Amino acid sequence: GNNDEGKALSAERARTYSSMEAFHNTLPLPSSFSSAYLGPFVLGGVLLLLLSSLRRRKRDKERPWPAVPGALPIIGNPIGPVENLVAQLEEWCRLYGKSGLFEFSLFGVRYIVACNDEMALRIESQRPYKVARTRMVNAAVKSIGADGVFTAEGHVWKKDRRLVGPSLNRRNVRDYLASVKIVSGRLVDKLDSICDDTVNIGNHILASTVDIISLVAFDKDVDCVSNGRSEMGEDLKRAFLGAQNRILSPFPFWKIPIIGQYLDGAGWAIKRLENEFSRLAREGENSPDISEAKTFLAKIISYNKGGSGDNTMSHKRLTGNLMTMFAAGSETTHVTMCSALHTIAIDTTGLQEELAVEALAMGDLEAAGLDEITDSLPRLRSLIYETLRNRGPTPFLGVENTEPLELVPGTVLPPHTNFFVPWRYISTLDNADPSRLTPLGPNNTPRAAFDARRWLAETPDKGLVVNRPSHKTGFRPFGEGVRVCPGRELAQIEMLVVLSSILRKFEIALEPNHAPMKLVTRFTESPNVDIRLILRPRKLSLKEALRELEPTE
C-alpha cells in the first residue's frame, strides 16, 4: 500500500514539475533564470531596503521630536484594544512628550501629538481653514447622518455657525429651561417608583437626555423616561458604535454600493434616524406657525428664512444639524452625568451631603430661573467642570492640516499630516502660561488629580463662587478657539437641573460589589461598566439645609 502511495506521489510530482517547466518555457526568460536574474533581483531588494532605511534615518535625523519606538509593520505602534487608545496616548505623552511633540504610527498612518499648551495652540489657532478634523473622522460621522456644524470646516462651518450659534446662546437657552425641568421631574418620579431596587442609572439618564433634546430641538415629547425605553437612544448607540468602527477602518467600507452601510450593523439604525430627522425638519419648514415655537428647530428655521444665498441652509444640511444636536446633546451629556454620579457615590469626603444641602437650599426649583439655578449651585458646577476636564467624554482632538504647516521653525509638514491634541493630559501640566493653567483649588490639589472642589473660591462673606473656566483659560472639554461648542450653555443647565433634582430627592450609593469603573475609548470616552446605584429617599429638609449653609463663627 505504501509503495502504491509512493508511486502516486512521484507521478504527481512529475506532473507538477512538467507543468512548471511548460509554464517556464512560455516566458520570455532564458533557461538560466536563476543565475541570470536571481542575483540582480535579490540585489535590487537589498537596495530598496537600504534606501528605505536611509530615508527613515534621514527623516528621524530631520525630525526635531522623538518617535515612539517599537513600531511593527502594518500595525504600527501597538495600543492593545481600541478602547485603550486614550490611556496609551497619555502614557506616551508622559514618556516621550517632554518637548511638547512626539509621533507614533497606527495602521500605516503617522500621527504627531501636540502635548503641551503652546504646541496645542499652534494647531488649534489654524482652525477651521488651515487645520480641520481628519478626513476619516468627518467621513465616518457624515456616514451616520450627522453632517452638521460638527463636521463643517472652512466656509461651510462659518455659514453653519452663523445659523446654529444664535439658536443655542444663553438668551435662547432660557426658552429651553421649561423642557429641561419637565423631563427632570419625570426622571425623579420614575426613580422614586423603583428606588427599592438597584438602578442602572445610565439607562435612565440617557432616556432623560433623549427626552430633553427631543423637546428642545423640535417639541417632540417621546417620554422615554416614563416608558422605560428609548428606541431613538438605542439607535443612537448603534450609530455611535458604527461611527467608531468606521473611524478606525482602513478603508471606507460603508461606501460599498447597496450593502456597505449595513456591514457593521449600524445601517438600519442610521436610516431610521435620518428618516425621522428629515421628517421633523420638513414639518418645521412647512409649518406656518414655526416662528412662534420656542424650539431649536424653530429658531434655526427663522434665522434661515431671514438669510439669503450663502446665508441659508439646505434641507439636507438642516437635517444633519438636527442629528448633530441630538447626538451631541444626548450622548455626551449622558456620559458626563454618569461619571459625575459615580464620583458622588464613591466619595468619602462629604461631597454628596454638601451638594444635597446646596440643592435643597435653592428652594423651589420649578420656579427658579436660569441665573438663579446657575448662581445657587457653585459646588455642583465645580463638580461638573472637573468631571468634564478629568473624566469627560472628549479627552482629545484629532485633526489634520489642509496646507503645509510649519509647526516648529525649519520643519514644514505636508498637507494631511495627522495630529492628536490630548486635551485632558494638557490640563494636568504645570508648564503653561499662568493664565491658562488649571487652578489648584482651595485644597491645593495637583492638576493631575481629580478634585470636585477645584473650581471653588470663597467670597469675603464666607460664601462660595465658581472660577468659571473657558477655552480662553485653557479649559478645552467644549473645544478651543472659534470652534468652541455652541451647545455648551444648554449642556451645563441640563446637567445642573437633572443632577440637583436627583440629589434633592435621593441619597445615592453604588450597589455592593460594584465592578470597578474606568473610562474607555469608544466614540466618546465612556464608563466601561453600567453604573448601578442604590437610591434611598433623602431625609434632609429645606430648613435643615439652610441651617447647614449658615456661616459658622
Image: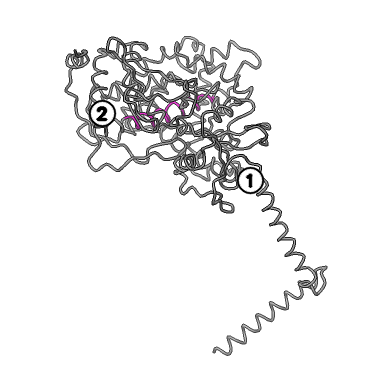
Residue drawn at x 47%, y 45% is 82
Query: On the rendered structure, is 536 left or right of 260?
Result: left
Where is 372 relative to 408, above or below? above
Closest to the camera, between mark 2 and mark 1, is 1
User: SS class of the residue under badge 1?
Assistant: helix
Query: On the rendered structure, is 490 left or right of 311?
Result: left
Identify which amino acid the numbered label 1 is placed on. Asp
Q: Position of residue 201 (x, y in %)?
A: 30, 33
- Would you name the residue on which mark 2 appears? 191
User: Badges 2 and 1: C-beta atoms under 8 Å apart?
Assistant: no
Query: On the rendered structure, is 41 left or right of 535?
Result: right
Within-10-Å neighbours for mark 2: few <14, some 14–19, many 20+: many
Where is 413 relative to 300, above or below? below
> Upstream in the sequence, badge 2 or badge 1?
1
Label 2, label 1: how far apart the Cα atoms are: 58 Å
Residue 60 disc label: 1
Q: Which residues are magenta?
A: 319-340
Residue drawn at x 55%, y 88% is 2
Q: Position of residue 406 (x, y in %)?
A: 66, 32
Identify which amino acid the numbered label 2 is placed on. Leu
- Pick the front one: 517 or 323: 517
